[in-house]
Image (tube, grey):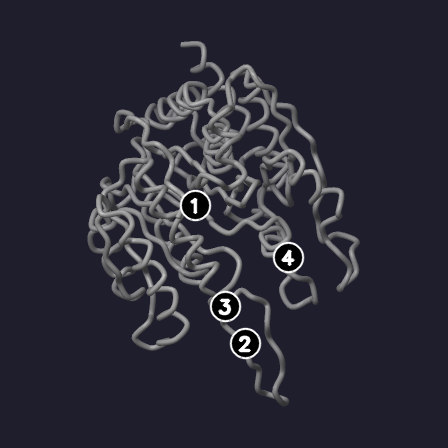
Amino acid sequence: PPSPPSPRMPRPAARLLIPALRAIPSRGLAAAAAAASPAKQYTVTLFPGDGIGPEISTAVTQIFSAAKLPITWEPHTISTQNVKPGEPLITREALDSVLRNGYGLKGPLETPVGKGHKSLNLTLRKELGLYANVRPCLSLKGVKTLYDNVNVVTIRENTEGEYSGLEHTVKPGVVESLKVITRDASMRVAEYAFAYAQTNKRKRVTAVHKANVMKQSDGLFLACVEEVAARFPDIEYEHMLIDNCASFLVANPSRLDVMVMPNLYGDIISDLCAGLIGGLGLTPSCNMGESTCLAEAVHGTAPDIVGKGLANPTALLMSGLMMVRHMGMHAEADKIEGAIHAVLEEGKYVTGDIGGKASTKDYTNAIIDRLDM
């Protein structure tokens, strides 16, 4: 099996919001990340998204520009507007842009419910081979929640499970949906989870499943994770039913560390974790493929505040920093993250969703001002 990335020295607690994101060696981005240097110029595909997407994307690009990151943006529009059901929502040109550049940043995308369109996010994951979704959640000073001890990472298998898109009508009133679990996909995400834990000095990996009911599908996933766990004796391993996992997260989130799970469970648990730290508007997310890294905002398009200058760009900004760290620019990412922490903790220029009255522009400018301190 491929060896995991070489561990990096842990940063102080205040700098652990977005753990370093590395690919498994022998898989595309590992070599690129190892060879990366701040002097290199990167081209990143930008999907501004729907709703508030263009507003928060602008905020992120302004902050990155102020920090003098060597990034050139290559924008592409993805939208369901004016597209007939059944037609491709994502052009080949847009997909090839991410594959060519190796990096992408995506704002929130909306897929109309029940109108014949395939999910844009699912389409991107499958077309780009984004097999792992990584979402770190850490309690933030200045953001009041019920918990102050959250520090968990959800690693979600991104390509199959209940989201395989295999549904059909058996007869009127009866619909069958297939759950697909394969050894290849399960081994791949399990390897990533343990390599991630070892690289980032995490202590434990928990496999989340429902193998007591879905004995073959979840049973296969669990067997694969256990097989990989045996290769990492320095990492504690356990498995946990998804209902127990949800209960532990609500009762005592410090009980969990890194969690790896199939697609649907990951969708649910990662959102639950986001709620523990203040919501999806504060939660970073990054999708990893063999040779691609797509950072994203996982919150909605917020149509009620579009154009009002009230959107919170934190989630997309934090996701972008995961990408920046993958490029090897750790000091630059730390500087921007430190500015975010300072602004949030001060509380003077924060947006309405986390109790403030500042505009998107005010919040963005406050972070930029902090970069010079």
* Residue at mark 1 to residue at mark 3: CA–CA distance: 19 Å
Residue behind mark 2: 177
User: Relative to residue 214, is residue 103 drawn left or right?
Assistant: right
Three-letter code, disc 4: Thr
Residue behind mark 4: 111
Q: Are marks 4 and 3 in contact (CB under 8 Å)?
A: no
* Residue at mark 2 to residue at mark 1: CA–CA distance: 26 Å
Q: Residue at x 66, y 28 (%)?
A: 73
The label number, if any, that marks residue 134 in the structure image: 1
Could you classify mark 1 by the number of other residues whose Cα lies within 10 Å: few (under 14), some (14-19), or many (20 or more)?
A: many
Q: Residue furthest front?
A: 1
Q: Earlier in the sequence, mark 4 or mark 3?
A: 4
User: Relative to residue 34, is residue 94 drawn left or right?
Assistant: right
* Residue at mark 4 to residue at mark 1: CA–CA distance: 22 Å
In the structure shown, which secondary structural element does the residue marked by tag 3 occupy?
helix
Residue 145: where, in percent of width, then height? Answer: 29, 43
Q: Are marks 2 and 3 in contact (CB under 8 Å)?
A: yes
Q: Earlier in the sequence, mark 1 or mark 3?
A: 1
User: Relative to residue 185, is residue 347 drawn left or right?
Assistant: left
Q: Residue at x 44, y 41 (%)?
A: 24
* In the depicted structure, whether residue 134 falls above or below residue 311: below
* In the depicted structure, whether residue 228 falls above or below residue 21: below
Q: Are marks 4 and 1 in contact (CB under 8 Å)?
A: no
Q: Quadrant of the C terminus?
A: top left
Three-letter code, disc 2: Ser
Question: Closer to the camera: disc 4 or disc 2?
Answer: 2
